[in-house]
Amino acid sequence: MIPVKSAAELERMRASGRLAAEVLRAVLREVSPGVTTEELAGFAGEMIRRAGARSAFLGYRGFPGEICVSVNETVVHGLPGKRRIALGDIVSIDVGVTLDGYIGDTADTVMVGVTDHRVARLVATAHEALAAGIACACAGRRLSDVSHAIEVTTRNAGFSVVREFVGHGIGRRMHEDPQIPNFGPPGKGPRLKPGMTLAIEPMINMGEADVEVQADGWTVLTRDRRPSAHAEHTIAVTAEGPEIMTRADEFS
Ligand code: MG
């Protein structure tokens, strides 16, 4: 059963979404050569606390960080630690915040300095795939139209879609119904209705789609160790079309 949020709940989701977006933008500005991933997480944690919110990831099934920091061949769920960001890396930052009982979840991948043009294309494709998926999150359409749009955009660019990890409904809990795969045929699954709130998050690989979870139980790497990119927005389905709840002000 996919929860449908009331107007009052959507207002709270907007607030948590805005905060998640602001934290994400602020952390991305801190990503530079020499900074450690745990310094980035500490910065995020401080900003989340100052806003009167808490990290939705810290302690989730024992997750030890305030945010996920996933570098290069790390697909998602990178644990903050001693790793130093280097020139040429791509870095995915995933932020989840709980504010007033509701969760905003958003991620983006940035390049640190100049990267290989294929890597730059991978990052751009993650953004394009996310936009294509969101464009299908309209009332009356089927859930798998979102999945299909992401897959087609990714495949047309010559990249592959991760299959083991998926987008999700979101609200009071980080993972609500439905699961939103980033692949599949169109026209399947439930019809989207105004008030549904979804975290849409393509995870795409330069090489093969296969991934493996490391011994820490969290870190997801590409099996072929080639780079991976990730982008995510929390959106609401509305009568007027998809509303991105994790959109930061352009100049924030
Ligand atoms: Mg998510």
Image (spheres, rainbow, N blue to C red):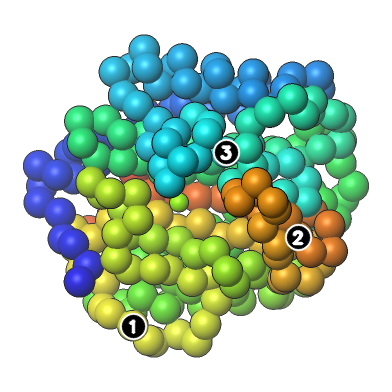
State how far apart marks 3 and 2 are (Cα): 16 Å
Of tags 2 and 1, the one toward the viewer is 2
Dot 1 beta carbon under 8 Å from ligand 1: no
**Residue 137 spot, x, y in % from top left:** 36, 66
Between disc 3 and disc 1, whose residue precedes?
3
Graded by Cα atoms within 10 Å as few (under 14), some (14 to 19) or many (20 or more), the crowding at tag 2 reads many
Of the two numbered discs 3 and 2 on the same chain, state the one appearing first in sequence: 3
Residue 90 higher or lower than 175, as above or below: above
Q: Which residue is mark 2?
A: 222
**Label 3–label 2 contact, CB within 8 A:** no
Q: Residues within 10 Å of mark 1 (few under 14, many from 20)?
A: few
Look at label 2 and name its amino acid. Thr
User: Which quadrant of the structure image shows residue 239?
Assistant: bottom left
Q: In the displayed orientation, state which residue is furthest to the front.
A: 215
Q: Residues within 10 Å of mark 3 (few under 14, many from 20)?
A: many
Q: Is residue 71 left or right of residue 143?
A: right
Instruction: Quickly name the residue at label 3.
Output: 68
- Which residue occupies 42% across, 78% down? 144
Q: Is mark 2 within 8 Å of ligand 1?
A: no
Q: Is residue 9 visible?
A: yes
Q: Quadrant of residue 56?
A: top left
